Image (cartoon, rainbow, N blue to C red):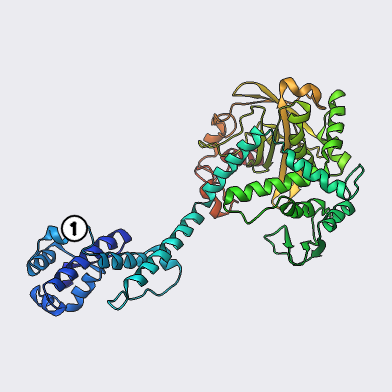
Amino acid sequence: MTIDALDLAPVETESEGSDALTLGRRIRERRIELGMTLEQLASAVDRAPSQLSALENGKREPRLPLLRSLASALQSTVDELLIDEAPSERAALEISVERAQRGSVFRSLGLQPIRVSKTVNDETLRAIIGLHQEVERLHSERAATPEEARRANTELREGMRVANNYYPDLERAAAQLLDSVGYSGGPVLQQTVARVAEKLGFTLHYVTDLPHSTRSVIDRRNGRIYLSANLPSRDARAPILRALGSLVCGHEEPRNYGDFLKQRVEVNYLAGAVLLPEAAAVDSLKDAKKRREISMEDLRDAFAVSYEMAAHRFTNLATEWLDLNVHFMKAHESGTLIKAYENDGVRFPSDALGNLEGAMVCRNWTARTVFAQPDFFNPWYQYTDMASGGTYWCTSRLENAKEGQYSVSVGVRFEDVKWFRGRETQHRSQSFCPDERCCRRASTELTQKWQASAWPEAATPTSLLAALPTGTFPGVDSHEVYEFLESHE
C-alpha cells in the first residue's frame, strides 16, 4: 500500500457519502474561488489530480494529514472545510442529486446515474431531486403497508363495534335489489342473483383464465362480470354479489388501505344482506329466540348459504334485532386469528397496539379445541372461563379452504346462552392467556426432556417469519412439537 493510498479512504455508506460530498464540494468551491486548477492544487499537496478529483466528487475521504495540507494550500482551516453545510445553492443541488443517485432507492431502479456537470442546469437538478423524492415516498409507503394494514384493520373493527356491525343503508340497498327482481321469499337462488346482475346492466361470464390474484373482474365499458369457471363450491351467488357490490355502493379506486378494507367489508355485507334478507332472517331468528333454539346451522340451512356467511350475518342482526351482544372469530388451524368482531366484551388476543390479525388464539378456546374433535358433522359447543373474568359460551364449526382448515365461531356471554341451542353442553375449559403458562409454554417435564433433542423446521414461508412470535425456531410451536415427539416416542 502506498502513502497516497493511506491518505485517502473510500466512501462505503450513504451517511459517509453525505459528509464526503459536502467536504468535496467545499474543497472545489474554495479552489475555484482562489483561481486554482485541479492540477495546481494536486501539485501543492503532492498528490495525483485523479485522486483529488475523486475527493472533490465525494468518492473518497481524505485522512487528517492530507486534509491539513489541503486546508493550508487553500488558505483555509480544517474546521472551515469540515463545516456540514453546502457552500452554495448550486452545490447543495449537486450534493442532493449525488446523494440520491448513491442511495438504495435509486440503485433499485436499475438506472445509470448521470454526471452532474456544469452544463446541467439548476432546473434539471431540481426535477431529478423531485422525482427521486416521490419514488422514495412511494417505496416508504409500500414498505409501511403491513403496519398501515394492521392500523386500518383496528380502526375498521372499532367502527363496526360502535355500529353493532349493523348498517341500515346496506340493508336498504339489498332489499331494493331483491324487490327489483320480484323476490318473494325463500332461499335466494342463483337465477335470482343473475337477474339482479341483468337488472344492473351486466352479463355474467365464467372463464378458466381468470387472473389468480382476483375473485372477479368487472368490465364496466361492456357491462360484463368475469368469474372463475372453477368455483370451489359451485355456488356463484356470493362472488357475483360481491362484484356487483362495488357498483351498488358507488366505490371508486381506494385512496389508501383503509378505503380498500372498508370497501371489502361493504361488498361482503351487501352479499350477506341479499342472500339472507333482513326481514326473513330476523323473523327466523326471533322465532328461534322465542323457542330458545338459536342456531347457526338452522340459519345456514334456511337460506342455503355457507356456515361462515350465516355466522357473519348473525352478527349483523343479533344486537339490532335480538338485543344480544356477540363475538365472531375465524381462526386458521395453526391457531392464527384471521377475522374477529365483538361487542360483548370478550378480549381477543392482540399485540400492544390492539392489532388482532395474526395473533395466536389460546388453545383452550373453542376456536382451537374444535380442531381436535373427531365429529365433523355436528357443531362443537363449549364454555370457557376467561382470565379477564366472566364465562363465555361458543359454538364452532370447521370449514375447508385451499390454505387449510379454519374454525368459524360465534359466542356470547354466559347470561345470554339461554337463548341458544347447545347451552346444555358439558364441555368446559379455562383460559389464562396472555399468561404463557396457559397454553403457549410446554410443561417443565416435556421441556426438560425434549428441548435439547427437538429440531423442527418451520412450515411458514420465510417472508412471514418476521411477523411471528420469536423463539428458538420462529414460526414453530414448541409445545406442539414436544407433545408430538412425546406421543411418537
Residue 31, relative to residue 195: is it above or below? below
The residue under the point 52% across, 34% down is 448
Residue 280, relative to residue 248: is it above or below? above
Q: On the image, which quarter does residue 318 sit in?
A: top right
Residue 220, relative to residue 237: is it above or below? below
The residue under the point 16% across, 67% down is 7
Lateral position of residue 132 relative to residue 160, left or right:
left
Q: Is residue 267 visible?
A: yes
Q: Name the residue under label 1.
A: 83
Lateral position of residue 47 relative to residue 147, left or right:
left
Under mark 1, the amino acid is Ile
Q: Can residue 424 be seen in this view?
A: no
Q: Quadrant of the C terminus?
A: top right
Q: In which quarter of the image is the N terminus?
A: bottom left
Indicate the position of residue 21 as horizontal and vertical percent values.
Answer: 25, 65
Lateral position of residue 457 relative to residue 70, left or right:
right
Which one is nearer the viewer's eye here, 231 or 380?
Answer: 231
Indicate the position of residue 443 as horizontal and vertical percent values.
Answer: 57, 31
The residue under the point 74% across, 44% down is 269
Q: How many marks?
A: 1
